[in-house]
């Protein structure tokens, strides 16, 4: 069967539940990975997801901030809970669907200053990546593993609106790019979006609310990713990976667009 999987930083699931329902209906998504749900487990709109046809839920909620969730048409089985956040934030939730292990992340943004000694938020971000990389180094690359979510790093020259300018800005600094590259190499992961749209095509999945017209401003970053392990990459349906940029133009949108891929499982 073909499994359509979407990752989306929703920036408050309760505030944008209508947009979620519309997206699920229009896209035919089977598994939805959400970040920044911004609610506790008991506040999550379970009934709305049941009505969407996504009744199987794994929720990692937190009061006010952060929070991640997986909603699925198909039953969810257990997967390792990585517990990588030293601050105890709800930043990772995991499940197995049709034999595919899914790890859904909301990785720390890192604040404004790319200095671990002077900025605890940036140190937290780097620590999260170091812990995740150490874990991935111990994993079997032939296992069917998918990492996805808001990684808060735009890794390539064509994943930012202005490469030279952004090299000084948290999300695209050289140390962050090197850190993300180490993680990708540790698991030999394929970046399904960039593989589908090779350089030099410019890609973005996030645009700031500061711009009245995000398309006219055209200052996007590709922060949201779907990666597949060597054991899963052959299941990626060619031509299926995409960034749903029009969703960013909907009424009261998240500042992130959904990113999706189809898997032949």
Image (spheres, rainbow, N blue to C red):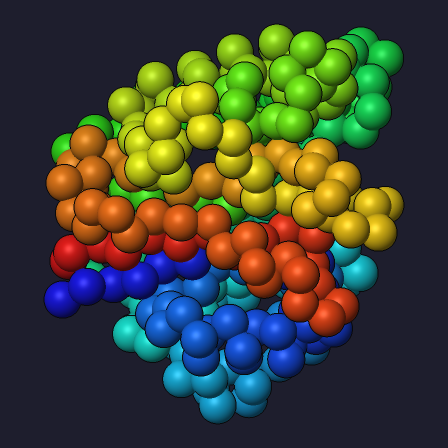
Q: Residue, x 69% and y 38% (percent of image)?
A: 218
Q: Is 8 left or right of 133, judged from the image as shown?
A: right
Q: Is residue 152 above or below residue 81?
A: above
| Residue shown at the point (40%, 54%) measured from the top left | 260
For the C terminus, which image quadrant?
A: bottom left
Rendering quarter of residue 219: top right
23 to 192, vertically: above or below: below
Number of numbered callouts drawn: 0
**Image location (x, y in percent) of residue 46:** 56, 82
x 43%, y 15%: residue: 182
The N terminus lies in quadrant: bottom left
Q: Is residue 84 visible?
A: no
Q: Residue at x 75, y 19 (%)?
A: 169
Place of residue 181 in the rendered image (x, y in percent of width and height, measured from the top left): 44, 17
Q: Is residue 134 left or right of residue 139?
A: right
Q: In the image shown, does 1 or 72 lie closer to the viewer? A: 1
Is residue 112 visible to us here? yes
* Outermost front residue: 216
User: In this rendering, would 46 be left or right of 58?
Assistant: right
Relative vertical location of residue 48 with respect to residue 73 in this rendering, above or below: below
Q: Position of residue 50 (x, y in %)?
A: 47, 87
């Amino acid at each position: 069967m073909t499994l359509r999987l979407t990752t989306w930083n929703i920036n408050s699931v309760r505030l944008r539940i209508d947009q979620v329902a519309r997206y699920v209906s229009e896209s035919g998504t089977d598994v939805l990975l959400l970040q920044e749900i911004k609610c506790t487990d008991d506040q999550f709109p379970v009934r709305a997801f049941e009505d969407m046809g996504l009744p199987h839920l794994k929720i990692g909620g937190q009061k006010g901030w952060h929070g991640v969730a997986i909603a699925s048409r198909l039953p969810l089985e257990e997967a390792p809970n990585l517990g990588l956040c030293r601050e105890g934030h709800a930043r990772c939730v995991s499940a197995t669907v049709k034999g595919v292990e899914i790890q859904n992340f909301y990785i720390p943004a890192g604040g404004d200053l790319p200095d671990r000694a002077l900025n605890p938020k940036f140190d937290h971000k780097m620590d999260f990546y170091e812990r995740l990389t150490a874990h991935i180094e111990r994993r079997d690359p032939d296992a069917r593993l998918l990492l996805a979510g808001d990684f808060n790093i735009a890794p390539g020259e064509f994943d930012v609106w202005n490469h030279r300018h952004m090299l000084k800005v948290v999300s695209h600094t050289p140390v962050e790019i090197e850190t993300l590259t180490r993680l990708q190499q540790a698991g030999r992961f394929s970046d399904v979006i960039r593989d589908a749209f090779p350089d030099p095509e410019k890609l973005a999945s996030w645009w700031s609310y500061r711009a009245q017209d995000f398309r006219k401003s055209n200052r996007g970053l590709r922060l949201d990713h779907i990666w597949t392990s060597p054991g899963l990459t052959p299941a990626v349906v060619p031509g299926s990976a995409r960034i749903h940029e029009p969703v960013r133009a909907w009424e009261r949108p998240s500042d992130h667009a959904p990113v999706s891929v189809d898997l032949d499982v």
